[in-house]
Image (cartoon, rainbow, N blue to C red):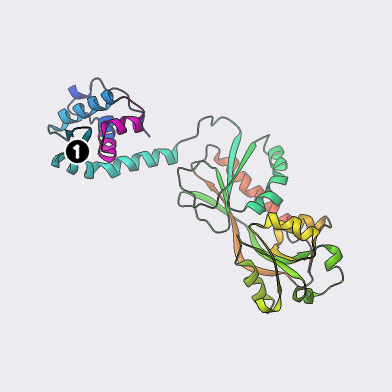
Amino acid sequence: MFIVAPEQTVAAQDDEVPLNAIRAFVTVAREGSVTRAATTLGTTQSSVSRYLSVLRDYLGADLIERRGRRSDLTEFGRLFANAVSEPIETVGFTAKRMRRRAGAGTNRIVVRTSLSTFAFSLLIPNLQAFSAEAGGVIVDVVSSLSPPVSSDDFDILITRDLSVIEPADSWEIYKEELVCVGPPNLVAGRELSIVRSTPILNITSRPDILPTWLRAMNLSSSDIRAGARYDHNYLALPAVMTGKCLLVAPEIIVSDLVRGGALQIVPGSRAPSGMQYRAYAVDRSAHPEIARSFCRWLARLCKKVAPAQAA
């Protein structure tokens, strides 16, 4: 958003386009009120009125008709608003997309992800290693399932199912493999047939996983016992570690637990899901080289930690 400041000489300069005045007019046209426009622009009503006067003098025609507290557009005003509103908004949108964040000198990046369990189990525990490798860079992590837009404040997006609609470099960091896991005292010495007699947890945020895995195993939903339901995998992990149940999950989020002995992969249960995890470093980042370095580091990390073991 532009911060409107008084233009003292524009009216006298007939060949200089009063851009701030046009911005003020577009805001009045959208808000339908000088008062609301002033609030939106963060200035005074008198300042907005002066801008309208400047623009009227520049164009040589009235744009606004006052009707009580409302400010209605004249016919000429409607034509002008229709012509300039979209270009003005485009300028604002482009400026926000391309701006460098305040404090660009700070060694700090923002990582946004739609993969909360991936962040919880793999990304965050390893961030200190990247920070040390990158000279002490601070990495902020935020989670969102919403499609990203160019005005969002992030340097890197890690996702499985979202797309970036702005210029960015991208890396494929992981081709998702599914495995069925359970506590060692339940799984040790057992074959794949254990899935027919042991409850398998359901994950609300990944309704695709169980049907995909069942097809790969030549099983149907009637061949297994449905267990408890959890919103996310990170909520289900403690349950499968301590209970008498199984979990079908992306191998990369359970690999550390498998290596540490807290979980064990059911033999013969690995199957590709067809999903890919990608990391995007957006061009508008205040630290583009650090962002790209992070994505390369993350790709190496994912390659290192999966698979946890042959099954």
Residue at x-position 44% and y-position 41%: 97
User: Residue 285: x, y in percent?
Assistant: 52, 40
185 horizontally vs 295: left or right = right
The quadrant holding residue 209 is bottom right
Total marks shown come to 1
Q: Which residue lies furthest to the left in this view?
A: 60
Q: Identify whether 156 is placed above or below 189.
A: above
Horizontal placement of 185 versus 22: left or right?
A: right
* Residue type at tag 1: Asp
**The image quarter in which residue 265 lies:** bottom right
Residue 304, position in %: x, y? 73, 55
- On-image quarter of the C terminus: bottom right
Which residue is denoted by mark 1 in the rendering?
72
Task: Spot the residue most to the front.
Answer: 68
Q: Where is residue 16 in the image (x, y as percent from the top left)?
A: 22, 28
| Residue 244 drawn at (x, y percent) | 80, 65
Mark 1 closeness class: few <14, some 14–19, many ≥20 residues within 10 Å: some
Residue 274 lies, with reference to residue 24, above or below; the image says below
Residue displayed at 74% across by 71% down: 269
Residue at the image point whose x is 82% and y is 62% from the top: 183
Q: Predominant secondary structure in magenta? A: helix
Callout 1: SS: strand
| Drawn side of residue 100 relative to residue 69, left or right | right
Q: Which of 133 and 275 is in front in this view?
A: 275
Q: Farthest residue in the top direction?
A: 8
The magenta region covers: 25-44
Quadrant in which the N terminus appears: top left
Q: Residue at x 19, y 41 (%)?
A: 80
Residue 231: which quarter of the image? bottom right
Q: Does the magenta stretch include residue 233?
A: no
Q: Is 187 displayed left or right of 85 in the figure?
A: right
